[in-house]
Image: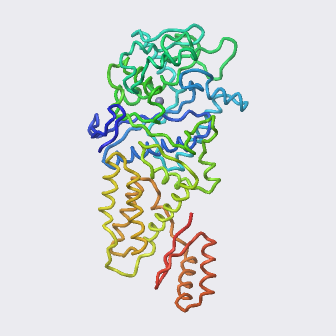
């Protein structure tokens, strides 16, 4: 299996640490709002990585975190805690906000067929692990205190700090120093622990050897990834935005303590643009899955749409392109239901379906080439719909559908058969057609359409499929 590794900026052959168990950590959501399509592009792509590993017979141990504390409105550790801020706005407490949006996130994950991580871990359940890690950093001399503010990581003490993101620290120093906390020793320093404000009580705060407060955003991922996966994991994944700050800081924290690489492979999902702009809270262009569904898009359509772009390239989102994906999904479902309506020719072979399944696996294993897979599938689809499936090739065809679902999670196998009444109606219509009773046959076609069933007419018979 080959994959692009951000660490080396190269596509590399994957070599696991242990022969048969691959460890993966994915930076999860900050649960203060509904996840938007930008997030879903990211998580569907991570799900494809897991599916590809499984397709290559690896067992996987996948950890994803839920950030329910400590993520401030600026990634550079300035501003307010996003969850606490939302709690104030909605007259709830921070725990209620985090619980609500976590539940919603998991519901959306399920709707999008994203595999369940083996461990879904919350920052607030791991405060002690984070304090312990800060203590270790303190012991090794990587920290300093800013009075009344918090404990900070001194990035100048970690010689490799700029390497991962190829940062220009001098430029950063010149640009940022004036705007941000002038008490920081270096512009890139970040908070490990923030002190609670003197005069007000936070919903989420804990006692610690440093004083009452809460952990910074970056320390949770270092503490939890190492707790569940050890000092070095195979994969660390997340959005491309994380490279210059969050992941750079995770590496600085973990590697300063262990002296070992945090991960052998770093996989990042590129941005999604709407109207050529990045999705951001301030632009208000973050469309949630619920909004898409309200606009007639099924979760599976979004999933297929995501697979049509490669994780390394910037993708553009528009409702128009989503319509094209909907049509392609409909075609895939049209192909899938041919297992219920075999062709009358007994010995025909439409396609070598076993070979096709292998081709898809190969494309996945070569740096997750999902756009090529979708184009390949589209060709197979057109041919299969035109030629049909014979009884002789039914087993291979069902195997193929199963494999597509395993590799891509498109639920082709789940598309249901129609009822006996609907089948009878189609037969009746075929008779009317043969008798050239067009008026009658049109009426029956309309009746089926009302039940979301469309017909593909051939000379001797018609094949049904569902419309989305
Ligand atoms: Zn993280």
Along the line of sight, the residue nearer the viewer: 308 or 264: 308
Q: Residue 186: x, y in percent?
A: 48, 13
In the image shown, does 364 or 346 lie closer to the viewer? 364
**Along the horizontal axis of the image, is 164 left or right of 430?**
left
Q: Residue 202, located in which quarter of the rendered image? A: top right
Count the marks: how many? 0
Where does the image place residue 45, in percent across and percent down from the top left?
A: 44, 44
Nearer to the camera, 398 or 348:
348
Chosen colour scheme? rainbow
Residue at the farthest bottom position? 435
In the picture shown, does residue 125 fall above or below 327?
above
Q: Image height check: is 151 above or below 49?
A: above
Q: Quadrant of residue 59?
A: top left
Residue 124, image x and y in percent?
A: 55, 26
Q: Position of residue 347 (x, y in %)?
A: 31, 79
User: In the rendered view of the protein, which quadrant contains the N terminus?
Assistant: top left
Quarter that holds the C terminus: bottom right
Check the image and report above or below for 175 versus 449: above
Q: Residue furthest top?
A: 147
């Amino acid at each position: 299996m080959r994959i692009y590794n951000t660490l080396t900026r190269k596509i590399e052959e994957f070599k696991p640490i242990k022969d048969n168990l691959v460890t993966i950590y994915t930076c999860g959501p900050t649960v203060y709002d509904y996840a938007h399509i930008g997030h879903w592009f990211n998580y569907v792509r991570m799900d494809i990585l897991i599916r590809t590993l499984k397709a290559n017979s690896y067992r996987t141990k996948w950890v994803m975190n839920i950030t329910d504390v400590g993520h401030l409105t600026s990634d550079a550790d300035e501003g307010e805690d996003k969850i606490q801020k939302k709690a104030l706005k909605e007259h709830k407490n921070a725990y209620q906000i985090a619980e609500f949006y976590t539940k919603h996130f998991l519901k959306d994950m399920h709707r999008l067929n994203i595999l369940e991580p083996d461990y879904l871990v919350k920052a607030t359940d791991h405060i002690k692990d984070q304090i312990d890690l800060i203590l270790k950093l303190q012991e090794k001399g990587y920290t300093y205190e800013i009075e009344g503010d918090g404990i900070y990581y001194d990035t100048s003490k970690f010689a490799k700090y700029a390497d991962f993101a190829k940062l220009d620290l001098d430029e950063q120093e010149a640009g940022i120093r004036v705007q941000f906390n002038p008490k920081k020793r270096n512009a890139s320093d970040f908070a490990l622990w923030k002190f609670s404000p003197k005069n007000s009580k936070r919903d989420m705060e804990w006692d610690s050897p440093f004083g009452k407060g809460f952990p910074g955003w970056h320390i949770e991922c270092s503490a939890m990834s190492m707790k569940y996966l050890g000092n070095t994991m195979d994969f660390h994944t997340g959005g491309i935005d994380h490279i210059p700050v969050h992941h750079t800081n995770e590496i600085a924290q973990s590697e300063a303590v262990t002296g070992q690489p945090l991960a052998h492979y770093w996989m990042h999902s590129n941005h999604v643009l709407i109207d050529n702009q990045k999705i951001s809270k301030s632009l208000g262009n973050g469309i949630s899955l619920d909004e898409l569904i309200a606009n007639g898009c099924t979760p599976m359509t979004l999933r297929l749409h995501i697979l049509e772009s490669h994780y390394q390239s910037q993708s553009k989102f528009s409702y128009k392109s989503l319509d094209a994906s909907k049509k392609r999904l409909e075609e895939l479902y049209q192909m899938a239901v041919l297992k219920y309506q075999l062709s009358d020719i007994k010995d025909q072979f439409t396609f070598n379906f076993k070979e096709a399944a292998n081709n898809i696996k190969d494309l996945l294993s070569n740096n997750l080439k999902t756009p090529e897979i979708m184009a390949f599938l589209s060709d197979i689809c057109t041919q299969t719909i035109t030629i049909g499936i014979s009884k002789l090739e039914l087993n291979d065809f069902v195997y193929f559908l199963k494999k597509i679902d395993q590799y891509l999670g498109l639920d082709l196998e789940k598309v249901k058969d129609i009822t006996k009444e609907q089948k009878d109606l189609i037969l009746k219509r075929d008779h009317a057609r043969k008798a050239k009773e067009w008026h009658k046959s049109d009426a029956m076609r309309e009746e089926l359409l009302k039940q979301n069933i469309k017909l593909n007419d051939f000379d001797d018979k018609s094949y049904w499929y569902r419309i989305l």
